[in-house]
Amino acid sequence: MDNIKVRYGPSPTGIPHIGNIRTALFNFLFAKSKNGQFFLRIEDTDQARIVPGAVEKIQQSLKLLGLLYDGEIIYQSKRLDIYQKHLEILKEKKLAYLDDGAWRFKINASDPKIGWQDLVHGQVEFPTNVLEDFIIIKSDGFPTYHFASVVDDHLMEISHVLRGDEWISSTPKHLLLYDAFDWKAPEFAHLPPILGPDHKKLSKRDGAKSVMEYINEGYLPEALINFMVLLGWSPKGDQEIFSLDQLCSEFSLERINKNSPVFNLEKLDWFNGQWIRKIYEEDNHHLKKLVQDKTGFSDILADKIIESTYTRVKKINDFSDYQYLIKQPKIDRNLLMFHDDAIDVLRSALRLLSNLKVVKDETIRSVYKKLDEDYSNWSMTEIIQLIGRSISGRKYFLPLLDMANIIGNKLSDRLENAIEQAEKQK
């Protein structure tokens, strides 16, 4: 294919959610896979529904994901003279007429059916007798989506239109307009919508959030791209982890699925965890900066916590859960009372750990083994849980060696504090 040109045409009526941005991603990947161009067009002809700041949020969403567009942004609201000029052409052809303050396109279809070869769905046809004359210029002088998109796609030399399935029923109108102007229509690919887990329209609760919201929650742009592209597109092999550059090489329209994909938050979490580990291995400095931006950890503390926890977390924000390693936590006695002699076990653990000259796996195991021998009514699991909870103040915690490496010589202080708090709560 030569001279591939596509466009992403959002309306500035709010912040685009992940389903809308997936359309931008597919357009971008298709263009880049063919050495083509990807344009951003703001379809702002419905003036009453414009939300201030929405254009900036659209730009920010694309930039955060690295979906850089070519050229300048095109604003349809600044092209009214162009639409008026093309209205005059239709008027001269007797294909436009005034009706109640608005201009309508007069349908003069000679064929009983109108159809096209959709690049996702195959042959699609509509009977022409179900189509009614439709508005192309509203009473306020602004064009409708149908008219503006056709005129602009032609003038921008758009070769392929990739958009959501909801526009399938509008495509016959667009094809009639192309015929009326004697223009060649672009090729169309209509993308099935992302569904929620209940197989209904994706809701905010199920995941229809913006890119900014996801990133604020600790998701990585790389993971969002990886997750979104596999919502409706299948790679050739078994590979699941793709960088944006890899996707630009691998992407093809032929591998877009006809069926609607289902949003799965657990899968997004999995991708995010994979990318956290990948970034740690390839650019730990970048991961450290992301973590510090979220947590405020010092350099030394960030290094220690990342090293101990990067294989466990799902989101960047999860690193904040390890704040308990920075300052003394409050101990809930209920966390500790596996048996009545829990405080005695803690005193023994404190004595044994205080006597350790070097804290490593073998020495910690020796402490656990000695406690297990001395307190036959305790299981090894209970002993490990007791000590871990006493140091962390939490039900779930890092292995003792990891906590020791981060907390250092304050490990004994933590145990002393836990004993003191537990005794006060008797």
Image (spheres, rainbow, N blue to C red):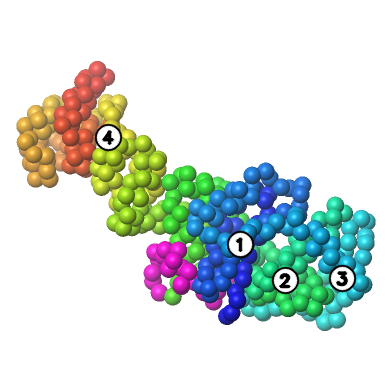
Tell me which numbered mark, 3 or 1, is placed earlier along the sequence: 1
Disc 3 versus disc 1: nearer the observer: 1
Q: Where is residue 92 in the image (x, y as percent from the top left)?
A: 91, 72
**Mark 3 to mark 4 CA distance (whole Å):** 72 Å
Q: Name the residue under label 1.
A: 71
Which numbered circle lies on residue 325? 4
Disc 1 versus disc 4: nearer the observer: 1
Amino acid type at image mark 4: Leu
Which quarter of the picture shows residue 148?
bottom right
Instruction: Name the side, left or right, on which 11 lies relative to 37.
Output: right
Label 4 Cα crowd, 10 Å radius (few <14 / some 14-19 / many 20+): some
Disc 1 versus disc 2: nearer the observer: 1
Label 1 Cα crowd, 10 Å radius (few <14 / some 14-19 / many 20+): few
**Mark 1 to mark 2 CA distance (whole Å):** 17 Å
| Residues drawn in magenta | 237-262
Residue 248 in magenta stretch: yes
Amino acid type at image mark 2: His
Q: Mark 2 points at which residue?
A: 154
Tell me which numbered mark, 2 or 3, is placed earlier along the sequence: 3
The residue lying at 58 percent from left, 52 percent from top is 59
